[in-house]
Image (tube, rainbow, N blue to C red):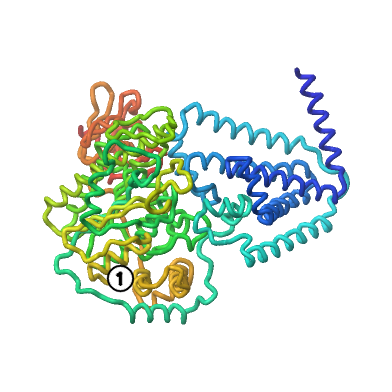
Amino acid sequence: MKETFKKGFGKFKDVVKKTNDLPLWRWVLVCFLTALLLEFILEILGRRSPISAVLFVIHSPLVFIYNIFLVFFTLLLGLLLKKRVFMVGFISFLWLVMGTINFFVLGHRITPFSFIDFLMVSDVMSMLDVYFKTYQQFLIFFGIFAVITLLVFAFIKMPKIRGSVHYITTILICFAAFGVLYVLTVLSLKTDIISDDFSNLGTAYKDYGFAYCFSNSVIDVGIGKPQDYSAVRIGNIESDIEKTSVYRKQMKDKPDIIVIQLESFIDIERVEGVNVDREPIPNFRNFCNKYPSGYLTVPAIGAGTANTEFEILTGMNSKDFGAGEYPYKTILTEKPCESLAHILKSQGYGTHAIHNNRAKFYSRDEVYPNLGFDTFTSLEYMTHIERTETNWAKDSILVDEILKALDSTPEKDFVFTVSVQGHGKYPKDELKCDEHVVVTRDDEDPELTNQFGYFVNQCYEMDQMIRNLKNRLDKRRGNYILFLYGDHIPALEFSDGQFKEGEINQTEYVIINNMNLDIPDRDIYTYEFSDILLTSLGYDRGVMQKTHNRYITLLHQNEDYKGAQLNLEYDMLYGENYIYSYIDAYQKTDMKMGIDDITISGVTENADGSITVTGEYFTEFSKVLINGDRYDTTYVDENALLIEADSAPEELVDGVTEFKVAQIDKKKHLLTETDAFTYSKQGD
C-alpha cells in the first residue's frame, strides 16, 4: 500500500513538473480552458441543475463568456509565482469552494451566497445546532481541517518551475487581461448585458452568473458617492422637502407605539397548492379587515431579516447599499443614523428594542445604540422561555416583555420587537410540532408537506400571541398603535407563479390602533412606513420621512425621488454630513441591556461545598464570576444561582472575595455584568 502510494505520488509529481515546464503561452491557454470548465461548474452549483446551466449558456452566451473571462483573469495571477501548478490549482479550488458553499446555502435559503456572508460567520456558528446534527458538525470541521492540511502539504511538496518566471511578460499579460476585463465590464453594463442593480439578489445571480455577482459583492460595499453630491445639493434637497412638507395637527394624547416584525410570517392561503383545514392566522386576518392593512414590499426573500428591519426603522432603502449587504454588519456598527427611535425619542418617548434571540445576532447589541434605543432586551435577559422543536424561542414570551417595557417609564414608549419563532430550518422527516392546523399539498410530497405543516403551525401560534397581546393592550386603556408585519416569506420551496395573491417579495401588514387613525388601506414599501406613522400622528419627521412624503404621489421610479434618497443616505452615513447643518446630529445612546437591574443580594457557602448566589432577575444565561473568573453555574430560578461543589473553588480566599453575575450568551460572549458584591468569609 505504501509502495503504491509512493509510486502514484511520484507519477503525479512528474506530471506537475512537466506542466510547470510548459511555455507561458500554453499556461495562458490552460488558464482559459480551466476558467471555462470552472465557470460551467459554478453555474451548475448555483442553479442546482446541469440542465439549467446549459440553458444559461444557450440563452445568455455573452454573460457566460464575460464570467469565463473574469475567472480567467484571477487564474492568470497564479502565473506570477514559481509554484504555478499549486497557485492556479489553489485559485481554482477557491472558486469551487465559493460555488459549493453557494450550492449548500441555496439548499437552506432563497438568497444566494455573497461576500457579506463572511461577516455573518459568528451568527452562522450560533445556528449550527439548528441546521446540522452533531455528527454532521464534526464532519464539517474535520473536513475543513483535512483540506487545510492537504493544502499546506501540497504547497510544501509542489515543485517550482525551472528557470525564470518572466515577470515583465507575465505582468504585462495580467495587465492586458485586466484592461480587457475592464472594457468588457463597461461595455456590458452600458449595453445591459450585465447590471450593477441587484434589487433582487437571487434573480441577479441567475441572470448574470455566479462569478460576476459574487465578485461584485466583494467590491461593492456601502453607498457609492452620487455624481451630483455636494453641500449645495443637500441644501437644495432639505429646502425642497421642508417647503413641501404637510403637517397634521398633533394628537393631544400620545399613543404607545409597538412594532412587531414577525419572522417569516405570511398567510399561507396565498400559496397555490397548499391546503389547510382551518384558518391558520385567524386573528391577523380579522385585524386586517378592521384596521389599515395591505401588502408590504420587503427587501428580502427567504432570508435577510435585518434589512427589512433596517428599512422599517430608518426609512432608507437597503438596495442602495452593496450587493447583498447588511448595513447592520457594516456601517451601522460604528455610525449613528436617523431612525424612528431617534425621532420618537425627540418627541419624549422611551425607546426599547426586544428580540427573543441572541443579542449579537446581526450585531444588534452594537447597532441599536446607534439607532437611538434606550434599552435592548434580548433572549439572554428573558425568563420562562419556551422553545420550538427546532430550538428557537417561541414568541409567546414577547407579550410580557413588551408590557414590561411599556411599564418601565412614566412617559409614552416606542417598543420595537423582532420575533424568531417562525425561523427555519423546517423539518422534513416528520412534522415535529403541535398540529393546530392540518396541512396538505396537491403534489402530496411528504417532505414538503412536513416542512409547510411545521411552518404553518408556527404561524398559528404566533397569531395566538398577537391576539393575547392586543387583549392585554386593550385592558391598559391608553392609546396605542400596534404595527404587525412579516419580515419576508419563509425559506421554503416555492415554484414560479405559486403565489395567488401578492408577489414573492411581499408580506402582509396591519396597523392596529384604538385611535381611528386616518390611514388608507394600500400596499407600501418597508421604507415608507416610518413616514406613514409619523405623518398620521402629526409628529415632526426626519429628513428621510420628509423625502418620502415629498414624492409620495409620484412613481417610485422617479429619478428625483431616487436621487434625493440616495444623496441623503450617502451624506448621513458616508459623506460630509452636510444635512447636520440643518438638523441636530444624531448621537449614540447609552443603551441598557434588559429592563430590569440584575443584582446580587447575598452569597452562601453550603455544607456540601457548593455556593449559592442570591439576587434578582437572574436568567438561564446568568453566570457567576468570582474574582473575575467564570464558574460553571446552574440556574435555579430568578433569585438564585448555584455553583456545584465539583465546580466551586475548594476554599474561598480569606478576607474579601468579589462576586459578580454576568450575562453570557451561548457562544460565551460576555454581554453585561453586575456591580461587584463583596463577600467576606471571615464575616460570614
Closer to us: 129 or 163:
129
- Could you say where residue 597 lies in the image, as x and y percent from the top left? 23, 47
Q: Residue furthest top?
A: 1
Q: Looking at the rendering, in which quadrant would you find the N terminus?
A: top right
> Residue 274: horizontal and vertical position, in percent?
38, 39
Q: In the figure, is residue 615 to the left or right of 334?
A: left
Q: Closest to the observer: 134 or 154?
A: 134
Q: Position of residue 588 (x, y in %)?
A: 36, 62
Q: Is residue 391 left or right of residue 167?
A: left
For disc 1, the neighbor class at 10 Å (few under 14, some 14 to 19, many from 20) is many
Image quadrant in which you'd find residue 294: bottom left
Q: In the image, 485: left or right of 219?
A: left
Horizontal side of residue 337 vs 113, given as left or right: left
Q: Which residue is at 12% across, 52% downward?
A: 476
Image: 377 above or below 197: above
Q: Position of residue 326 (x, y in %)?
A: 46, 55
* Quadrant housing residue 590: bottom left
Q: Residue at x 29, y 49 (%)?
A: 354
Viewer-proximal residue among 362 and 547: 547
Give the quadrant of residue 140. Answer: top right
Instruction: Write down the residue under mark 1.
Output: 541
The amino acid beneath tag 1 is Arg
Q: Residue at x 48, y 70 (%)?
A: 575
* Quadrant that contains the C terminus: top left
- Image vertical order of residue 308 relative to residue 224, above or below: above
Q: Determine if residue 672 is in view.
A: no
In this view, 554 is above or below 13: below
Question: Which residue is at a point 41% across and 32% down the rendered structure image?
Answer: 427
Label total for image: 1
In what element is the residue under mark 1? loop
- Residue 237 visible: yes
